[in-house]
Amino acid sequence: MYEVWLFYAIMGMLSFSFAGVLDKLILTNFTEDSKAYVLCQVMVQQVFTIPILLLMAPEFVFPSTLIAIAAGAIQVLPAIYYLRALQLEDVSRVSALEYFYPIPVFFGTTLLLGETLALKDYVGSTFLLLGVFLASYRHENKICLKNFSPAVKPFVVYLIFAAIYYITIDGLLESVNEWHIYAWSSQGMMIAGFPLLVSRSVRKEFRDFFFQGPRAVSILIFEEGFQFLGIIFFLFACALGSAALVTSVGALQPITTLFLVLGLGLVKPRLRRDLEGKTDGNSVIHKSLSFLIIAAGIYFIC
């Protein structure tokens, strides 16, 4: 059983890595408004959700279905802030910042769901905190607050809602299955996303995105495909293990994202600059050190 949840967690982490790289690519080349892009994601997400609704026919289970819808709805706001962070920062550094949320998940599942944590879990949390701190600090000659990543500010909102989401999902898996949660939470995202269309600028950019040609739409479909796989693998991993452990394995994402971008850079150097910014020796060493500390945190936790 241990190997199964770990396999799902790793596959989910890899899927989210590919999705994050494609998100950065789209935001760099095809759209500027993070709210409009979230709407594009929600619409294309239905390509994967509707078949599940038709084939699995998930029943309406009170109150679990309503909670799943609400969990999806509250994901719209953090998704917007996550995308804003991607516009401000390198994709691997954003991935590192994202994986601060296992810490609030740890304490949330302990307080609300009765899960117990050992000393090694607290040690691992400390390493995660230190690794994220280093990842958020840009390599400069002097220590100064302005040297921290500008993506930190929008990530405060993201982290709060992400922790709430993962704790909620962990509790829901006790009453409904993974497909039920995915299908209904996806509908929650769509319901919460439509009010964004009130803005004329959002409507325009949302419409214009789908008229940019097949390349933009194709990349978005691939991005949502990886996002779909990431969510499904994550849900199956949480069903077999705790959310705290699964999210900790996901903290490997910044390492895999950096290697993925560097690999793509060997083929297209310009693409590497768009996705990762500075990739000189000092920058790579700095990022790698912070990622290794995050990996050490995962080792203690798992």
Image (cartoon, rainbow, N blue to C red):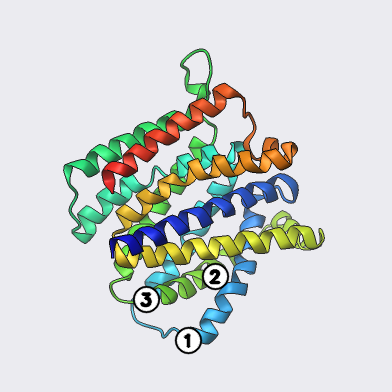
Lower sequence index among marks 3 and 2: 3
Residue 200 % position (x, y): 72, 58
Looking at the picture, which amino acid does disc 1 mark? Ala
Q: In front of the other: label 3 or label 2?
A: 3
Q: Is residue 227 left or right of residue 107?
A: right
Looking at the picture, which amino acid does disc 2 mark? Ile
Q: Give the residue at x 35% y 48%.
A: 102
- Say which residue label 2 marks: 191
Where residue 133 sits, quadrant-wise, is top left
Where residue 65 sits, quadrant-wise, is bottom left
Q: What secondary structure is marked by label 1?
A: loop
Residue 64 % position (x, y): 35, 75
- Say which residue label 1 marks: 57
Question: Badge 1, how many Cα within 10 Å: few under 14, some, many 20+?
Answer: few
Q: Give the residue at x 70% y 44%.
A: 28
- Count the labels in the image: 3
The N terminus: image quadrant: bottom left
Which numbered circle lies on residue 156? none
Question: Badge 2, how many Cα within 10 Å: few under 14, some, many 20+?
Answer: some
User: Observer-nearest residue: 224 or 262?
Assistant: 262
Q: Determine the CA span between mark 1 and mark 2.
A: 19 Å
Q: What secondary structure is marked by label 3?
A: loop
Q: Determine the CA span between mark 3 and mark 2.
A: 22 Å
User: Observer-nearest residue: 261 or 73?
Assistant: 261
Q: What secondary structure is marked by label 2?
A: helix
- Say which residue label 3 marks: 177
